[in-house]
Image (tube, rainbow, N blue to C red):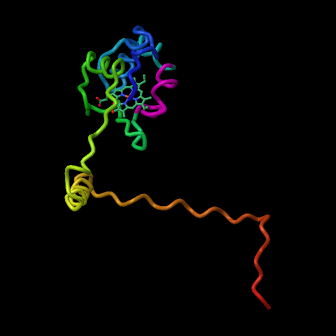
Amino acid sequence: MPAFGQGMLQPAQINDLTDYVLRLSGQAGSVQAATRAAPLFQTNCAVCHGADGNGLRAMGAPSLRDKVWLYGGTRKEIHDQIALGRNGVMPTWEARLPSDTVRALTIYVHELGGGEATPAPAPAAPADPAAPSIQPPR
Ligand code: HEC
């Protein structure tokens, strides 16, 4: 996640967003500050965390509404995450682990997550009525 404190948002805006996130996660925070921050959240944060703050898996962005925190859920920790960002990047293990170990870990982690099946394929596109119909040979 980008460091919004480095020129993207003003300190007062980051304080307001901190209250917004505190309230999203069910903690005490200023209602006035959170109200000021609501449009800021939609403009700057919703693209990754979702309009409702539930997180977007495809972006790797966690839910801000639950009690699960990667970096801590206190006012200071939330503020610092917004201001400083983390650019959470996992190190690469390709050169450090043999490929069969990576494969075994993949299966292990997949099981840890409940072993969800791959998503169902998208439904087939409806037939185009303008397309020429193919007639069987007579
Ligand atoms: C480009 C995508 C992106 C945007 C935009 C973004 N975030 Fe994040 N955010 C992330 C990711 C990914 C993480 C997980 C940690 C990391 O990698 O930095 C995160 C983590 C967080 C956390 C810490 C959550 C925890 O569990 O500790 C907070 C709080 C947060 N974001 C708030 C915000 C706010 C407020 C904004 C808007 C000002 C914002 N984020 C914008 C991607 C984003």
Front one among 31 and 126: 126
Relative to residue 13, is residue 39 drawn left or right? right
Overall secondary structure of the magenta stretch?
helix
Quadrant assignment for the C terminus: bottom right
The residue furthest top is 12
Q: Please determine whether, in this image, residue 83 is positioned above or below residue 128.
A: above
Q: Please determine whether, in this image, residue 87 is positioned above or below residue 102.
A: above
Identify the residue shown where x is 39% and y is 43%: 57
Check if residue 46 falls in the magenta segment.
yes
Q: Please determine whether, in this image, residue 59 is positioned above or below residue 38.
A: below
Front one among 28 and 122: 122
Front one among 132 and 83: 83
Q: How many marks?
A: 0
Q: Position of residue 74 (x, y in %)?
A: 24, 20
Check if residue 2 falls in the magenta segment.
no
Q: Which residues are magenta?
A: 40-53
Identify the residue shown where x is 38% and y is 36%: 61
The quarter of the picture showing ligand 1: top left
Identify the residue shown where x is 45% and y is 32%: 52
Q: Please determine whether, in this image, residue 94 is positioned above or below residue 34.
A: below
Relative to residue 119, is residue 137 drawn left or right? right
Q: Position of residue 86 (x, y in %)?
A: 31, 27
Front one among 89 and 74: 89
Q: Position of residue 84 (x, y in %)?
A: 33, 20
